Amino acid sequence: MNVPLDNMSVALPLIVACAWGLLVLVAEMFSSGKRFTGIGWLTIVGLAVVGGLSYTTGITEVTFAGALALDGFASYFNLLLCGLAVLAVLMSIDYVPASGIVRGEYYPLLLFAVAGLLVMVAATDLIVMFLGLETMSMAVYVLAGVHKAKPRSNEASLKYFLMGAFASALLLYGIALLYTITGSTVLGDIATALQTNQYSAADRLVLDLALGLLLIGFGFKIAAVPFHLWTPDVYEGAPSSVTVFMATAVKAGAFAALIRTVPVALLPLLDNLTPLLWVAAAVTMTVGNFAALRQTSLKRMLAYSSIAHTGYLLVGLTAGTADASAAVLFYLTVYGVMNMGAFGVMIAVARRDEGCEEISHLAGLSRNHPMLAAAMTVCMLSLMGMPPLGGFIGKFYVFAAAVEAGYVGLVVIAVLNSVVSAVYYLGVVRAMYFESGGLELEGPRPYAAVAVGGAAIATVLLGVVPTPILGAASRALQAVVLGP
């Protein structure tokens, strides 16, 4: 393989992310005292460097025989992933030591997970995309069980690993079947083969099986029904600072890989995929919302909420148009910041011995910490889809694109589900403002509070002035590269 050095800029963000992870690991070995504060800030600096290296102004570069591309699409998601990771690190600086998780590998694993996500969003070859997914997954499997003293954390790690291994095997088998029919794993070559070749009935059957296996693999990572069963248990058992990373950055990276693969590279087969995506969207949002209604645990409620939002995002993929895909990119951005805010409040007020995992633990929060309660209210209303917040604008663009594509029935189901979701989101607001009791709080954690404030402000701004981000999402899709 001939790899010109002048194209190494494509892989530079990935190389820096891995190298910085090793640097943080070594720095932690020689640190003492308030090590997690200093190591956390060193991690943030590394993420900022990676984000800066990922920024591209209309320049597209491809390297490693067309396996990796630094295009507008990869640049958009790299910046989003680094931003979400920075917020997750800010929430971790106080929370991790206070929770008794003094593990030197915590921040390096977070950086390695980000490196895997960067590979996923930049990959134009399915094998390379799979390697990125596995790199990310291995790091997150360990992070989910990083609190070794807690059986729930160990259980979460084991469940995530076992179910993730099965999903990865099915995804890899789907890639192999697709290779047998198209003769390539490069997305551009696959798209060309699907457009130009005439396949027999037997080949079409193998293609359909390959697509089904690909959807199963991606469906696990995005927590789509019926591949969602791991989500509530893993979200609840993992440390909250890991859960927020999984719920936002991991989901965004998985959707990025899915978008580059399905509505772009596999566009000739979209007619075959549309019925499956339609059913998956409808069932996922419905199951997620109605299961969330029954939850008293805040973490499990947000886990089912995450499943429901996967359904809303699948509405955009079902539509399959450029406008719908751009709306999905915008919605992923909004989804990331408003979930960061919601989980961040839980982290900011958590006690070491009891945490803050029940909705009842937030009772009376408005009297003790009115700013945190206000931020949580903004995030809950945005998740519900209340105008003029970012969640409403994101849903509006996704639903409008689906209506324009002719999927009125699916949009009606989505709107009705949004109405149902108001019950449990407003339940959190009611507990904070109209109920008494709750935990005797130790006081907000300053770094987590800063992250919460930033996420809440971003949620409002994305609703009031969505045009810049939506324009960037549209340009990112126009710049998608599928190979050399």
Image: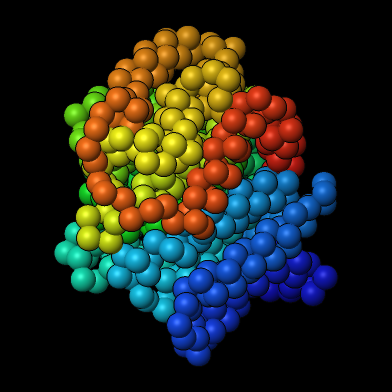
Query: Who is closer to the viewer here, 470 or 478?
Result: 470
Query: Who is closer to the viewer here, 405 or 307?
Result: 307
Residue at position x 64%, y 60% in the image: 67
* Rendering coords of residue 173 (x, y %): 37, 54
* Rendering coords of residue 349 (x, y %): 36, 50
Answer left or right for 226 relative to 459.
left
Most distant residue in the bottom direction: 30
Is residue 259 visible to us here? Answer: no
Answer left or right for 114 relative to 311.
right
Query: Who is closer to the viewer here, 52 or 414?
Result: 52
Answer left or right for 136 relative to 184.
left
> Which quadrant would residue 358 be assigned to in this image?
top left
Residue at position x 77%, y 57% in the image: 61
Query: Which part of the image, by quadrant, shows the N terminus?
Result: bottom right
Image height of 295 relative to 481, above or below: above
Residue at position x 22%, y 37% in the image: 437
Query: Which part of the image, by quadrant, shows the C terminus?
Result: bottom right
* Rendering coords of residue 187 (x, y %): 60, 48
* Rendering coords of residue 94 (x, y %): 43, 63
> Which quadrant would residue 431 be assigned to in this image?
top left
